[in-house]
């Protein structure tokens, strides 16, 4: 199945009724392409992936449209983005933090706890290898590029306005792990209250991380085989890097400890 080509067809319909100015702001997204590999290779990898992980972020915070899927293969920041030494928005840790979480979600097992200290101090070369070879998707909740900051009301408006298109995008990608990168829960609420609203069989992991005030939250839908995890926005603004990582990996590991197959 050619996932990104199907997404391109979706994006054509998505933008049909936009103004020319809005079309110039539209950001395509989906499966991230890998440097040095045929573009369709990511489709085969995604088909075979046991854990099909997507990260939903807010919006592109610069006022120009883009194809997010190409961030690692072309453009002036691609090399830094691949090396996790800068990236398009890497000064605040955006891509590096996503890469750490991706590694943790792929490698964590019931009897193997991949903690932040280990992954950040001894696994960085492996993190880069996974980042540049394993399939994952990056999705913008608000498809029109914006500004350095975006309000919660703007994200909610975009999600409501584009609800059917975004649901179709998720249906095309068929993820089984959805990481919602927004501390205000707009994306988590959309996934749980709209996309998966008819699912009644839910396993919830909700608790305060030990010795902190950090709230961890994961909902697992065993009937659909989908796990939805709350994450902070993947930047270092006002948060320590370990918190961004552990808010996702901690509840995920608790789910694995109960022998749920993910």
Image (tube, rainbow, N blue to C red):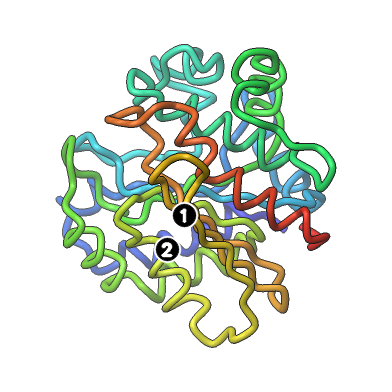
Task: Please tell me whether residue 215 is drawn above or below residue 163 in the rendered image.
Answer: above
Q: Is residue 232 left or right of residue 134?
A: left
Disc 1 is placed on an element classified as strand
Task: Please tell me whether residue 169 is drawn above or below residue 82 in the rendered image.
Answer: below
Residue with the mark numbered 2: 188
Q: Quadrant of residue 31?
A: top right
Which residue is at a point 21% across and 67% down the rendered structure image? Answer: 157
Q: Quadrant of residue 161?
A: bottom left
Badge 2 vs badge 1, beta-carbon distance below 8 Å: yes
Image quarter of the N terminus: bottom right
Residue with the mark numbered 1: 230
Residue 117 lies, in percent from the top left, at: 61, 21
Sequence-wise, the earlier of marks 2 and 1 is: 2
Decide which of 219, 23 is in the foreground and name it.
219
Which residue is at a point 16% across and 39% down the rendered structure image? Answer: 147
Decide which of 190, 115 is in the foreground and name it.
115
Disc 2 is placed on an element classified as helix
């Amino acid at each position: 199945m050619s996932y990104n080509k199907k997404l391109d067809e979706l994006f054509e319909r998505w933008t049909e009724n936009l103004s020319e100015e809005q079309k110039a702001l539209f950001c395509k997204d989906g499966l991230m392409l890998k440097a040095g590999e045929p573009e369709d290779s990511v489709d085969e990898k995604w088909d075979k992936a046991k854990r099909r992980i997507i990260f939903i972020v807010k919006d592109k915070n610069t006022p120009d449209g883009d194809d997010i899927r190409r961030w690692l293969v072309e453009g002036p920041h691609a090399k830094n983005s691949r090396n996790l030494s800068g990236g398009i928005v890497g000064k605040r840790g955006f891509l590096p933090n996503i890469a750490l979480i991706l590694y943790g979600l792929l490698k964590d097992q019931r009897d193997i706890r991949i903690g932040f200290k280990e992954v950040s101090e001894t696994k960085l070369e492996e993190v880069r290898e996974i980042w540049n070879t394993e399939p994952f998707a990056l999705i913008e909740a608000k498809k029109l590029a914006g500004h350095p900051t975006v309000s919660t009301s703007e994200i909610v408006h975009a999600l409501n306005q584009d609800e059917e298109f975004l649901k179709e995008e998720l249906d095309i990608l068929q993820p089984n792990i959805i990481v919602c990168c927004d501390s205000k829960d707009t994306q988590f609420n959309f996934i749980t209250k709209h996309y998966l609203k008819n699912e009644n069989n839910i396993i919830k992991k909700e608790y305060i991380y030990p010795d902190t005030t950090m709230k961890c939250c994961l909902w697992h839908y065993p009937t659909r085989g989908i796990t939805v995890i709350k994450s902070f926005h993947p930047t270092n603004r006002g948060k320590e890097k370990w918190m961004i990582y552990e808010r996702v990996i901690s509840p995920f590991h608790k789910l694995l400890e109960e022998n749920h197959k993910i």
